[in-house]
Amino acid sequence: MILAIDTCLAASSVAILDGDTIRAARSEPMTRGHQERVAVIARDVAGEAGVKFTDLACIAVTVGPGSFTGLRVGLSFAKGLATALSVPCVGVNTLEALAASADAPGFVAGVLDAKMGQVYLQVFDGGKALMAPDALEVEVAIARLAELYSGGSATLIGSGAPLVAEVLPDATVLTPAFADPVAIARLAAAKPVPTHSPRPLYLRAPYAVAPAA
C-alpha cells in the first residue's frame, strides 16, 4: 500500500494506492500554504480510505522540478513519515508524474513553464524516457521535441505545453495545474526499492540568492 504526496506545483495532493485499487485521493489547489495543509490532507485521505499510517508499505513523493518551497515541504513531510514508519520513501520527478497523468499512448512530453524564457522538459515514448529532465530555452526545447518525435500520437502536458506546441501542431495539449497523485503512486510502485532517501531535483538555481558575505 502506497501513500503518494505532491506539493511541487499548484496543489497539495495525496493518494493511497492498494495494489491496483485506488483507496482514496484528494488534491487541494493552492500556490502557497502547502506546509499547513499537506499533513491534514494525508490524515483525511487515510481516514477516508480506512487506512492507518502503520498499514503503509511505501511513501512516494514528487521531488521537482517545481516550486522550490513546495517541493521541500513535500519532501520533508514524506521523508519524516517514512522514517517514523520505517518504510521506503520513493522519489518521482514532476515531469514524469505529469506525463503519466496524461494517461496517453505514444509520445508524451511533460513541459513546465520555468519562466525567464525557459521550460522544464522531459519526453517519453510508450512510458520510456527519451531524455533526462532538463531546463531549456524555449527554442531549444522546441528543437529537442522535433528531434525526438518520430511520428504517431503526441501529447504535451503541463503549464509549458502551449509554449512549445507549435512544433507538433497535431498534438493534444493539456495544461493541468498539478499532477495526478494516483499516477505518482503507480510510478513509485513500478520503481525498485531505493537505497537512499530522495533528494530535490533542482534543474536550475532559485531566483533569489543570499548576498555575498
Image: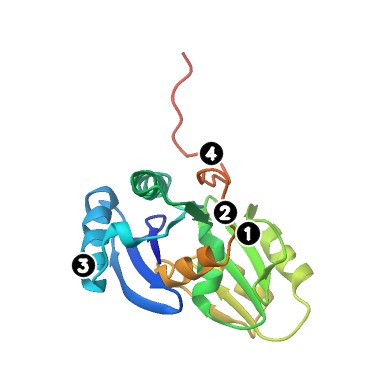
The amino acid beneath tag 3 is Gly
Give 52 or 163, whichever is nearer the viewer.
52
Q: Is mark 3 on a helix, strand or loop?
A: helix
Pointer 1: what residue?
138
In the image, which is nearer the foreground, mark 4 or mark 3?
Answer: 3
The alpha-carbon separation of the residues under discs 4 and 1 comes to 18 Å
Give the mark, 3 or 2, whose residue is nearer the N terminus. Answer: 3
Give 114 or 76, whichever is nearer the viewer.
76
The alpha-carbon separation of the residues under discs 4 and 3 comes to 38 Å
Name the residue located 61 percent from the left edge and 68 percent from the top edge: 164
Name the residue located 25 percent from the left edge and 51 percent from the top edge: 33
In the image, which is nearer the foreground, mark 2 or mark 4?
Answer: 4
Pointer 2: what residue?
117
CB-based contact (under 8 Å), mark 4 and mark 1: no
Give the mark, 4 or 1, whose residue is nearer the N terminus. Answer: 1
Pointer 3: what residue?
47
Name the residue located 47 percent from the left edge and 66 percent from the top edge: 184
**What's the colour scheme?**
rainbow
Give the mark, 2 or 4, whose residue is nearer the N terminus. Answer: 2
The amino acid beneath tag 4 is Ala
The amino acid beneath tag 1 is Val
In the image, which is nearer the foreground, mark 1 or mark 3?
Answer: 3
Name the residue located 40 percent from the left edge and 62 percent from the top edge: 4
Rendered location of residue 119, percent (x, y): 57, 57
In the image, which is nearer the foreground, mark 3 or mark 2?
Answer: 3
Q: Which mark is residue 205?
A: 4
